Image (cartoon, rainbow, N blue to C red):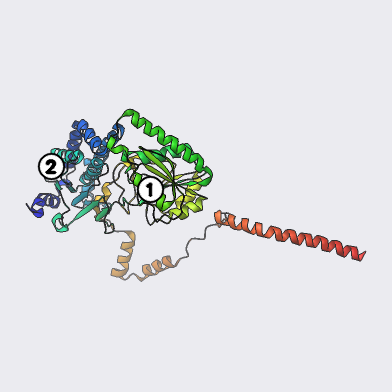
Amino acid sequence: MSSADSLSKVRAAAIDGRLDNVYFRQDQFRRLHSVLVEREEEALEAIAHDSGHIDAEAKIQYYLVLSSIKRYLSQLDPEKSLQEEYRIANGADALDRVESVGIVYVEPTTHTLFYSALVPIAGALAAGSCVVLQLQDTLLEAPNLVRKILSAALDPDVFMIVQEMPDDQYLGPSFIRILQNGADEPATNTRLVSPGNARVIAVVDRTADIDAAVTALVTARLSFGASSSYAPDLVLVNEFVKAKFLNAVAQQMLRCLTEENDSGERKKAQENLQGDSLVQELQAKCDARVITSSSDGTVAEIRGRNFEGFPRKIQQRCLCVHAVTSLDDAIDLASREDTVLATYLFSNLASAKYLGQFITSNATFVNHIQLGLLVGPAGPSGHVVDPLERYPTALFTRPKPQRVIQTIQSKELSDVLTKGDQERLGKLLEEGQAPLPGDRPYTKGVGFFEQGISTGLSLTAAPVLVSLGVLFFYGTKSALTRWR
């Protein structure tokens, strides 16, 4: 069967608006949730088998899928939908009216695939869009389980699974592609691209709570197979607290890995994820110094300042640390990146404000890491990263506003044009030419740069003033002596 024939049912359902009925959408979510609950044990086993995640990580991924489905279902309000549908008939504007895009194509990432496939599908269904999911034939358990769950839960007319990306013509006149593995083409409104290869940078200032920062960073680096898009790739640490930070990191990594080994949950195949080749590459290209290393993880200090040889993404159980001299030094290093996926700032709030202001990042988190982000793909470029809702329904709709009430300005302009009301036209011109509101009271504050300038001038002027004072004193003394 050709791609066009195999997609014809889904395309027809999208054109007919099969999912416009909010009750039908609710039924799809209830069935999906029911099937997921029934297959809990199978789901946890599949996740652990494919990724080597410990029991807690598998359960977190499973929980986040269920939580997302419940959140999407809570947004479906039949009574509200009915009121919104008849706003025009009741003489009210419908300026926020939207409609679904039709078909959403999902190309999931292999990282936490159970979440990466099911959550965007749920978001698309909640928005009223049909779904086409790309899944390759594989011996892995999670993709096959996702296939079984969707087939058992969803109406076969509103979703379909394909093995390769279909051409645009087969998806119909209106569609969106979700490309979680990145794309050569730039992101657009119809192409939601996850910049999974963009770096994640953390900054630990001398004002930070070192223990809290270490716990958050090590947990993010080691969890979920150490392959999350939001795991920290490079940690910039103020040189005054570097020794304390590295010591705390070594202890925290040892503590985490000891707990994992004691539980015996993580698969042997996943244990050697620190990558000897990565360490050797860092030593050769970045003048790296290994702080601690074992079969379970590595802490490396990057001493070189040239990061051209630094890997784009760290996909192993390795935490890379680099010392900086100041906030400005950290800003300079972070600004070398074209795109920073996320920035984790550990400092007092004033320093965090300064860092966040000058480091361009898709998302910034102060004194914490949203652990939910470690599951699933990177958030799509050009859109706000919501830790609770990676794919909000707004991504799968397009605006279709309707207005029934004419604005006051429109009525006035209509009178001027149709009735030739010159008096009213003159008043409109007077209103437009009226002076703007007065300037706000100007209060001069001393900012960061003003303080620097003042300090520099003080240091420069002080010796000059002292010298002039000394010359004046001795000159006056000499003149008085001669006069006597």
Binning the other alpha carbons within 10 Å of mark 1 as few (below 14), some (14 to 19) or many (20 upward) gives some
> Of residues 209 and 312, which is closer to you in this image?
312
Residue that mark 1 sits on: 280
Where residue 245 appears, as percent x and y from the top left, is: 48, 40
Q: Is residue 470 left or right of residue 193?
A: right
480, above or below 249, in the image:
below
Tag 1: residue type?
Gln
Q: Amino acid at mark 2?
A: Asp
Q: Is residue 187 above or below residue 483?
A: above
Label 2 or label 1, whichever lies nearer to me, is 1
Residue ranking furthest to the right: 484
Residue 112, image quadrant: top left
Residue at position x 34%, y 38% from top?
Answer: 223
Q: Circle 1 sits in a helix, a strand or a loop, which is it?
A: helix
Q: Mark 2 sits on what residue? A: 155
Query: Where does residue 409 sit, x and y in percent of width and height?
Result: 34, 62
Q: Nearer the viewer, residue 438 or 452?
A: 452
Q: Earlier in the sequence, mark 2 or mark 1?
A: 2
In the rendered image, the residue lying farthest to the left is 1
* Left or right of residue 154: residue 236: right
